[in-house]
Image (tube, rainbow, N blue to C red):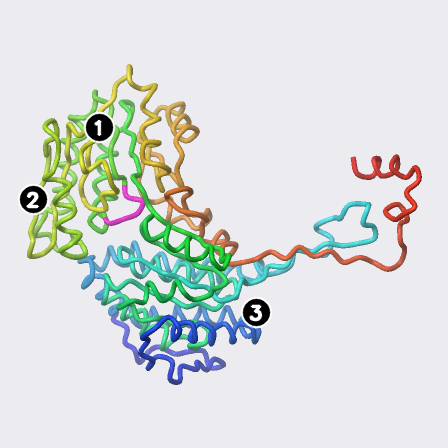
Amino acid sequence: MEHTSSTFQVPSDYSPCNDEAYALEFSSAEEVQALVSRVDTYFRGHFTLGVEFRIRQLKALRSWLKSHEVEVLQALTDDLGKAPFEGYATELGIVYDEIRTCLANVRKWSSPKGANSLSASVVHFPSTSKVYASPMGTIGIMSPWNYPLQLALVPLVDAICAGNCVVLKPSQTSPHTSALLRKMCQEAFDSRHVFCLPAGGAMNDWILECKFDKIFFTGSPNIGKKIMHAAADTLTPVTLELGGKSPCFIDKTANIKRAAQRIAWGKCINSGQTCVAPDYFLVHEDVVDEFINQMKVYLHKYYGADILKSEEYPHIVNKRHFDRVCGLIDNHGPNARVALGGGRDPETLKIEPTIMTGVSFDDPVMKEEIFGPVMPILTWNDATRKTLLDIPRKFGHPLACYVFSEDKAFQKQVIDWVPFGGATINDVVIHLANNKMGFGGFGNSGMGAYHGKVGFDCFTHYKSTLTKGNLIELPVRVPPFGNKIALLRLLMR
């Protein structure tokens, strides 16, 4: 059933104040800072601290999204060619799940740890300890273009759940979704609580000159470095969700049919423009031919005989990225070849899922994160297995890692030896959708994590607080010390 804007109802006890804020035309960092200061003033008025307020805001967001589902999914189609099913499964549905999780747990997460649940040292007797979950303040969220809804709204949900105010800056590379996010924030929230900046112009530079209580960024490592450098000047904490070349190990014990079935799905989601997409494939030489054959079967089963004409196969976001990915396919060394796919359509910006074999570390496709439907294969055998797990270290710390194997010892060896943000065994991508555990990388793939309780923690400062009773005062800690060190050793050992 189609939803229309007229069915959206803000809870009756909520009155957003959007006044002139969305009519502003920003032309300098100073004007952006004035807006940020306005939001910060609202936070310091303590309006966001109450759990009931947070619940109302999360429900208002969910209500707006449900009222505008057709518009939301159409924006994702317009920007990235995502079929409505894919847009819901990989973006909108994940946002709904995050809202549901936060609504179910916000009271528990926000409550102080019980009065006597943290016992103080006997040295401090009599006393009790509590830890208070305190919102950080005004959060700057900078979201990317590849999952322009999910990667803007999941951190937004977590920040609201934790009691913060938010200034959101979406990507100008996904203009339809960015415009929709701005409309959503204007209609669903008080502009002093959540404000969405326009996506274009010099906004990326201006926002980095503003003072936030925390910055949350999803995007490339190069921009992540700039954000971290800017944040260092004001000692602003950052969470960086970046990317990297995520390896996919395929052992000779793997169920190759199932591996191909799942990789064909996961690699083609968003046409490979996914930060946790398997980037390159380390396939045992005994099963490489079977793997390629099975990939061909499932790619055509999913998208038909002519994949470029499939309405359910997404396109590359724009011409610049299209040309970059095509260059990774076309510019290669003498031993590399296209074993499957390679076709492209400049009019629709679609590139066939492309398997490359014979690649080396010197080929362009192995020198950067692919961020497209290209699958370079490097083979290994039992003799080279000892050096296999060192390969991912050539590319830093990947955001994700995948292992297809029935060998439990090999699975554990990969998990123990390979540095990565998160992993899935015998499937791809899906670990990030489980908000019962955190999602994030480290090193060049990021800093910090979010989703679910970990997302609440991401935007929370925990205030450790001790309350000392006045009934008595133990003399052991005060001068004159005399021979009290023996008693001190007994108490503090």
Which sits in the foreground, 267 or 40?
A: 40
- Place of residue 127 in the rendered image (x, y in percent of width and height, measured from the top left): 79, 54
**In the picture, which quadrant includes the N terminus?**
bottom left
Please give the residue where the numbered disc 2 appears in the rendered image: 343
Q: What residue sits 89% from the left and 50% below the top?
A: 474
Mark 1 vs 3, N-terminal side: 3
Which residue bears the numbered disc 3? 49
Q: Residue 415: x percent and y percent?
A: 41, 31
Tell me the amino acid under the disc marked 1.
Answer: Leu
Judge whether residue 136 is colored magenta: no
Q: Amino acid at mark 3?
A: Leu
Task: Choose between 2 and 260: the one closer to the eye.
Answer: 260
Label 2 vs 1, first from the N-terminus: 2
Q: Residue flagged by tag 2: what amino acid is it?
A: Gly
Q: Quadrant of the C terminus?
A: top right
Q: As rendered, which of 316 and 340 lies closer to the eye?
A: 316
| 358, above or below 455, in the image | above
Q: Is 19 rendered above or below residue 89?
A: below
- In the image, taking residue 357 as reference, residue 129 lies left or right, namely right
Q: Which residues are magenta?
A: 273-277
Left or right relative to 70: residue 435: right
Image quadrant in which you'd find residue 196: bottom left
For marks 3 and 2, give the CA distance. 54 Å
Seen at 28% across and 73% down, the residue is 3
Compute the Cα span from label 2 to label 1: 21 Å
Query: Which residue is the extreme one toward the front?
Result: 233
Name the residue carrying label 1. Answer: 378
